[in-house]
Amino acid sequence: MPELPEVETVRRSVEPLVLGRTIVAVRLEQFFRVIGDDTVSTLSAKVVNRSIVAVSRRGKYLYLLLDDGTAIQIHLRMTGRLVLTPREEPPVRFQHLTFELDNGTDLRFADQRKFGRVLHVPAVAMQELHERLGPEPLAQSFSANRLAKRLERRMGRLKPVLLDQSVIGGLGNIYVDEALFVARLHPCRIAGELTPREIQRLHRAIRHVLRQGLANNGTTVSTFQDATGAEGTNAQHLRVYGRGTIGLPCVRCGRPISRIVVGGRGTHICLRCQPEAPPVELIGASPQDEMIPFAPAVLKKSP
DNA sequence: TGTTATGTTGCCAT
DNA sequence: TATGGCAACATAAC
């Protein structure tokens, strides 16, 4: 669920509904550890009567910035959800924490698998996180050159390296599979052994699949919704993710997509379009350099 | 009914 | 330091 496009979709849906609002109460419901080492009283002491001055995102982390310079840091992990509803609405399933706002609405955090966290943090913690995470892949400053530097001398396989949040901030399992397919790279290639041309393809592919996910309000595989309950529509545009399990045809060559395990993660690839061996170095352009076209991702539905 | 997989990250061992 | 494996948890699907 929540990779960069999904978290950004949540941010955009939350922001207009909480900006300028003041937190008037905190309620802790099912899973107490959702707020880390705080208790409901220590957390309340820090956030009640504070107002929300901004909603920001870094990688897959969300921040509600408060008027005293501190912040509420939210990570959705696998199944976390933010829900904004009128106070009188009954609790949603797996609801663990509620911030009551001064206009009669609740900002609620729900999480089926209890991996997500909502932590009150000082400004310095935000700074530390910012320094620990890799660059934002959609930022203008994220160039192919910058990507090349991040991959330089890495001896691990490409997919786990791209999932490492200290290499790039915000990529997860779905968008890595999608980007590797578009760039025609096998997930088991050694990250530090890509040619400059391959890095350029990968850079374009990463930005393309993330932008597309964002344009479709995220990928809803099973549970993802934004804060208003809307689901993303990007699932219908996925090229490989989820298609390997049932061997659906590659949108490019028609061969069945395969599902393998790389770094303990389910991985979806086209064995023909994403060759395992690095290309023979050639002078000038070669068919190997072709990127899989962005457009024909959606297969025609059979009548 | 038991086994396996699931979008993430942090901790531990090598 | 870099890399790989697994646990944290609840549920659905096979």
Image (spheres, coloured by chain):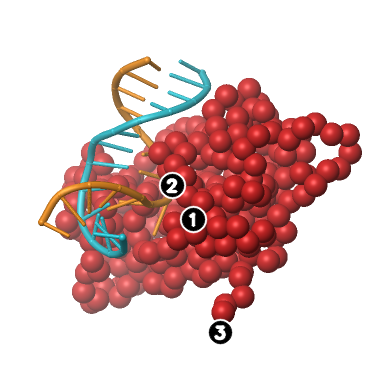
Chain colours: A red, B orange, C cyan
Q: Please tell me whether mark 1 sits on a helix, a strand or a loop.
A: loop
- The CA distance from mark 3 to mark 1 is 22 Å
Q: Kindly identify which chain the residue marked by label 3 belongs to.
A: A
Circle nearer the N terminus (3, 2): 2
The residue carrying pointer 1 sits among few (fewer than 14), some (14 to 19) or many (20 or more) residues within 10 Å by Cα, namely many
Pinpoint residue A50: horizontal percent, then vertical percent: 35, 54
Above or below, A66 relative to B13: below
Determine whether label 2 and label 1 are within 8 Å by CB. yes
| Quarter of the N terminus of chain A within the rendering | bottom left
Closer to viewer: mark 2 or mark 1? 1
Q: Nearer the viewer, residue C10 or A288?
A: A288
Snapshot quadrant of residue A152: top right
Position of residue A12 in the picture relative to residue B7 (left or right): right
Q: Are marks 3 and 1 on the same chain?
A: yes
Q: Tell me which amino acid carries mark 1.
A: Gly
Instruction: Return the disc, 3 or 1, that comes first in the chain's sequence.
Output: 1
| Residue A150: image tag | none
On the rendered structure, is A188 left or right of A30? right
Q: Quadrant of the C terminus of chain A?
A: bottom right
- The residue identified by callout 2 is A266
Q: Residue at x 72, y 45 (%)?
A: A201
Q: Residue at x 47, y 50 (%)?
A: A259
| Pick the front one: A284 or A123 | A284
Residue kind at label 2, given as amino acid type? Gly
Q: Amino acid at mark 3?
A: Pro
Does A104 sit left or right of A155 as displayed? Answer: left
Q: Nearer the viewer, residue A82 or A160?
A: A160
Vertical relation: A185 (above or below) A213: above
Please tell me whether mark 3 sits on a helix, a strand or a loop.
Answer: loop
Badge number at residue A303 = 3
Structural distance between the alpha carbons of marks 2 and 1:
9 Å
Looking at the picture, how far across and down is residue A15, in whole percent? 47, 63
